Image (cartoon, rainbow, N blue to C red):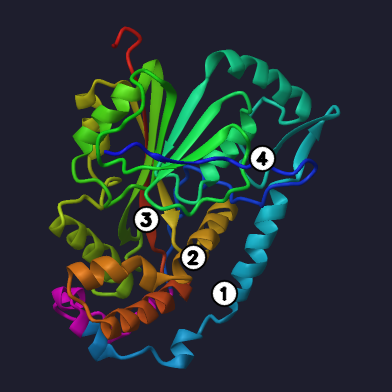
Amino acid sequence: MSTPAIRKAVSPTPGSSPPARPAPAGPTSPAAGSPEAAGVSSSAAPANTDDALTGAHWLQQGMPEEDAQDADSSLDSDVESSTASISSTIFNYRMINGRTYHSDAVTDIEYWAPNDEKHLDSLEIYYHDNIERVIDIGTGAGFWAIDFADKYPNCEVIGTDISPVQPSWVPPNLNFEISDASKEWTYKPNYFDLVHVRFFVGAIEDWNAFYREAFKVCKPGGWIEHYDHSPVVTSDDGSVVPGSAMDTYGKVLAEAARRIGRSATLADDDTMEEGLKAAGFVNIQTKRMKMPLSPWSDDKKLKEVGLCAYSTLSADVEGVVQYLFGNVMGWTPEEISVFAAHMCRELKDKNIHGYYHWKYVWAQKPEDAQ
């Protein structure tokens, strides 16, 4: 692999503030409930559900009728107002004896540490001696890397991706580099205290090789953490009907990834744990979670997670499926367009309690490793 192209960070203007970034979803599970209706037309759920895996089936359905598609037209306006309120409520900190603590809008866990300037300054002293270099593999828009660099200004942070889509207005201790993580990594051995990986589903052909590269650049005693998901949509109450658009969505994506030698179901199998162990990592730990695809849950926090998921996915279903459905599975643009319309209609139906599986795995490089 060629030497990574470095995009030098540009420091923020003094007194200015970076753009708001979304808070990550917590590791909780959706509440089960019985739907009043499945929200899927009989034509969209054929007796032979294999038919639904073809573009021809969806083209035959035609575009959803406007009244059905807009049956819950208030959802989009609810999403817009609710996501704005989410962004503001996370800053409603708890006040105890003059010190501020996390917002109840984020978690109801009784976490002990203050989040005010005095405590953050004390943490900087601690982390200055304990974490020096961090790399964010597949940084995308760079939100995680920016947040980390903001929090730990004495730590060198590198974010890598294959596309230069990151902002130039970032903390001075952060650099973005163009680098293909599926090839040999060119960083120094035993260099990083933390290797962070997120949302690589369907991107890596040889996960064992990927984790060997991560092991090589990680310091002895350092850590790797990897978040990933499965696009296969399921429900606890049967409201994701076999042959529906939601059911078809993940199954076609998983099959398309399989055809090009990739795994799209990292949260459903043991690829992450087995690959980390084979590379030499120890103290491997796993946490599984569910992500609602719309704000159907009665749980306040899960409803917020669903709002964010809905606004993200419904904004560009075609963009998500275009390459794998079209270039790999052979669907036509018309078939993809009609399918995307059915998918958006189902996403709007809060009687359909669909969710993704996500998985968070973290592990440590042995202290005596070389």
The answer to whether 170 is drawn above or below residue 322 in the figure is above
Separation of disc 2 and disc 1 at Cα? 10 Å
As drawn, is 171 to the left or to the right of 53?
right
Frontmost residue, 180 versus 141:
180
Asked if the residues shown at circle 2 and circle 1 are in contact, with their CB atoms under 8 angstroms apart, the answer is yes
Residue under the image location 23 percent in, 81 percent down: 332
Q: Which quadrant of the rendered structure holds the N terminus?
A: top left
Res. 75 mark: 1
The kind of residue tagged 2 is Tyr
Circle 3 crowding by C-alpha within 10 Å: few under 14, some 14–19, many from 20: some
Residue carrying label 3? 356
Q: Residues within 10 Å of mark 1 (few under 14, many from 20)?
A: many
Q: For residue 310, which numbered disc appears in the image?
A: 2
- Assess whether mark 4 and mark 3 are in contact (beta carbons under 8 angstroms): no
Q: Is residue 23 above or below residue 222?
A: below
The quadrant the C terminus occupies is top left
The earlier-in-sequence mark between 4 and 2 is 4
